[in-house]
C-alpha cells in the first residue's frame, strides 16, 4: 500500500460490516498499527455534530467509508426514504468532516447499481448518468451517485484526494443473511444450506434464475486497499465492474419465485 504508511491513522467507518471487516482483516494481515474504529452505539454517522467532533479529536490520516445502509432488492424497494436519507447523511457528514480535519486520503464505496439499468455489459464508466436506473434501488443509487460527485467536487474545488470505488455485489464473512433484507447471494447460500441440513428436495428462490458472476468480500478488500495505494487525485475506480458484472436478476416487485431441484 504505497500511499499509506503502516503507522498512518486509518478510520474504517463500518468496520463491523462485511466490507469493513474484510478491510480490518487485511490491515491486520499487513501489520497496519493505527486503525481507528467506532461502533454505531459510540458514533452514529448520521449525527453531524458527533461525526465532526470525532474527526476533530482523532484527526485520522486516511478515511474509508464502508458504512452505509445496505440491503437487497426487497429492502431497497420497500424503504427508499431510509436508503436515500441515511446514506446521504452518513456520507455527507464523513466526507465533510474528513476534509475539514485534514484527512489526506478518503475512499468512498459506491456500488455498481449507480449505472443505468440498461448500461452496456461490461459496464463502461462513461455509462454513469446516461440512462434510467433500476427502479427498485433507485434511491440507494442516487445517494451513492451523490457521494461520488461530492468526492469529485472536493477534489476539483479544494484539491482533496478523495476517491470512490464501485464494487459489484459481494458476499463473504459477516454478510447479512436475513432472508428479507439480504442481498441475493447471501439469501441463496442460506436457503441452500438450510435445505441441505433439512434434506429438502426443493429450494424456493426469488427472481428469474439468471444471476451472473459475483465477487467475494475478501477480494473486495484487496480492491479497496489497491485503490488506496494506487490512485491519487480525483480518479474514480470501477473496481471489479469489468471482471464481475452486475447481476442480471430483474426482481419484480411482486417477488416472482422459482424453485431449484435439490435432488
Ligand atoms: N454488500 C455488497 O454486495 C455491496 C456491493 C456494492 C457496494 N457495497 C458498498 O460497500 C459498503 C459496505 O457494504 P457492506 O455490505 O459491508 O454493508 P454492511 O455489512 O451492512 O455493513 C455496513 C456497516 O455500516 C455501519 N453503519 C450503518 N449505518 C451506520 C450509522 N448510522 N452509524 C454508524 N455505522 C453505521 C453498520 O454498522 P452496524 O454493524 O452497527 O450495523 C455496518 O458495520 C457500502 O457502502 C455498500 O454500499 C456493498
Image (tube, helix red, strand yellow):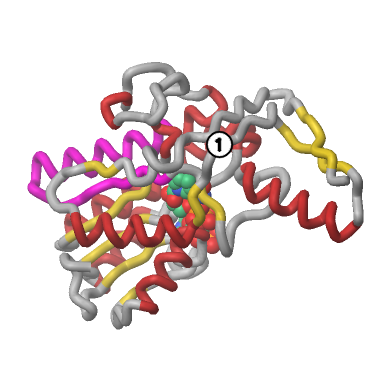
- Residue 114 visible within the image: yes
Total marks in image: 1
Q: Residue furthest front?
A: 263
| Image-based side of 101 in relation to 204, left or right | left
Residue 169 or 92: which is nearer the viewer? 169
Image quarter in which the N terminus is found: bottom left
Q: Residue at x 36, y 61 (%)?
A: 222
The answer to whether 196 appears left or right of 245 in the picture is: right
Q: Main secondary structure of the magenta part?
A: helix
Q: Is residue 213 above or below residue 98?
A: above
Residue 148 inside the magenta-drawn segment: yes
Q: Which residue is mark 1?
A: 212
Horizontal side, residue 70 vs residue 60: left or right: right
Magenta range: 141-167
- The residue shown at (39%, 30%) is 122
Query: Where is residue 10 shown, x and y percent of the image?
Result: 28, 70
Q: Residue at x 70, y 46 (%)?
A: 188
Q: Position of residue 49 (x, y in %)?
A: 33, 58
Question: Residue 72: x and y, percent?
Answer: 60, 41
Residue 126, percent from left and from top: 26, 26
Q: Pick whichever, 167 or 77, lies toward us.
A: 167
Res. 69 visible in picture: no
Element assignment for label 1: loop
Amino acid at each position: 500500500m504505497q500511499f499509506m504508511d503502516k503507522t498512518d491513522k486509518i478510520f474504517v467507518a463500518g468496520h463491523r460490516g462485511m466490507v469493513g471487516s474484510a478491510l480490518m482483516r487485511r490491515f491486520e494481515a499487513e501489520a497496519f498499527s493505527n486503525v481507528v474504529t467506532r461502533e454505531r452505539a459510540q458514533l452514529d454517522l448520521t449525527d453531524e455534530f458527533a461525526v465532526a467532533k470525532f474527526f476533530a479529536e482523532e484527526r485520522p490520516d486516511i478515511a474509508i467509508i464502508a458504512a452505509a445502509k445496505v440491503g437487497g432488492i426487497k429492502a431497497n424497494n420497500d424503504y427508499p426514504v431510509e436508503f436515500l436519507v441515511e446514506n446521504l447523511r452518513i456520507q455527507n457528514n464523513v466526507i465533510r468532516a474528513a476534509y475539514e480535519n485534514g484527512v489526506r486520503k478518503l475512499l468512498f464505496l459506491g456500488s455498481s447499481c449507480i449505472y443505468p439499468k440498461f448500461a452496456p455489459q461490461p459496464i463502461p464508466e462513461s455509462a454513469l448518468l446516461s440512462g434510467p436506473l433500476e427502479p427498485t434501488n433507485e434511491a440507494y443509487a442516487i445517494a451513492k451517485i451523490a457521494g461520488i460527485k461530492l468526492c469529485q467536487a472536493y477534489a476539483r474545488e479544494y484539491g482533496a484526494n478523495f476517491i470512490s470505488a464501485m464494487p459489484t455485489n459481494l458476499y463473504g464473512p459477516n454478510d447479512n443473511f436475513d432472508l428479507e433484507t439480504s442481498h441475493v447471494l447471501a439469501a441463496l447460500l442460506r436457503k441452500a444450506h438450510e435445505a441441505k441440513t433439512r434434506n429438502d428436495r426443493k429450494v424456493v428462490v426469488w427472481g428469474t434464475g439468471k444471476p451472473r458472476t459475483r465477487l467475494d468480500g475478501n477480494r473486495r478488500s484487496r480492491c479497496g486497499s489497491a485503490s488506496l495505494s494506487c490512485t491519487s487525485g480525483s480518479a474514480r475506480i470501477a473496481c471489479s465492474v469489468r471482471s464481475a458484472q452486475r447481476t442480471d436478476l430483474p426482481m419484480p416487485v411482486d417477488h416472482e419465485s422459482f424453485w431449484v431441484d435439490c435432488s
